[in-house]
Amino acid sequence: MEKNSKHTKFTEEELKAAKEDLMTEEGFISDPRYKVCNQEAKWGVGLGAFNLVLWLAFGYGLGSGPVSEYTYVFGLPLWFFMSCIITPIIIIFFTFRYTNKMADMSLEAMTEEEAIEFQAEQRRTK
């Protein structure tokens, strides 16, 4: 493989390892963006499940006692304040934190060289 100006930021070893990662059993180069998209989707589902668990824990955990024993924060029952005010703030924090770490990638069709370079970049950032 001759050196191309596009490949100057990666060594030959990095490109070879990236190509081996992408090669399927059938001999095709798979699109490396699928792995990234699957990981991002799993994080999204995980954040949604975490949101639901927090909401249920605060809503039913703190709100299961008699009304006369409720603690109030800013005029709201503690269970409501925690489940409907604090939980969204926590989820928004984690969402922003994760989205800043997401890969910036084009959704256009990739050539084999671009796929190998993208995979090499992903291997480098792991």
Image: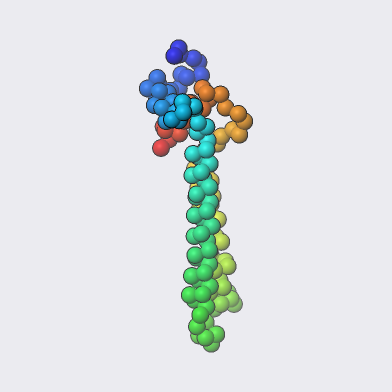
Residue 74: quarter of image: bottom right
Q: Position of residue 43 (x, y in %)?
A: 50, 50
Residue situated furthest top in the rendering: 2
Residue situated furthest bottom in the rendering: 68
- 24 and 31: which one is in front? 24
Residue placed at 50% from the left, 49% from the top? 42
Q: Would residue 124 be seen by someone viewing this image from the given angle?
A: yes
Residue situated furthest left in the rendering: 13
- 114 and 100: which one is in front? 114
Quadrant into which the N terminus falls: top left
- 63 and 38: which one is in front? 38
Residue placed at 41% from the left, 27% from the top? 20
For this view, does 19 lie left or right of residue 51?
left
Q: Position of residue 9 (x, y in %)?
A: 45, 22
- Relative vertical location of residue 48 with respect to residue 81 in this rendering, above or below: above
Residue placed at 49% from the left, 44% from the top? 39
Q: Would residue 18 be seen by someone viewing this image from the given angle?
A: no
Q: Position of residue 44 (x, y in %)?
A: 53, 51
- Relative vertical location of residue 54 with respect to residue 97 in this rendering, above or below: below
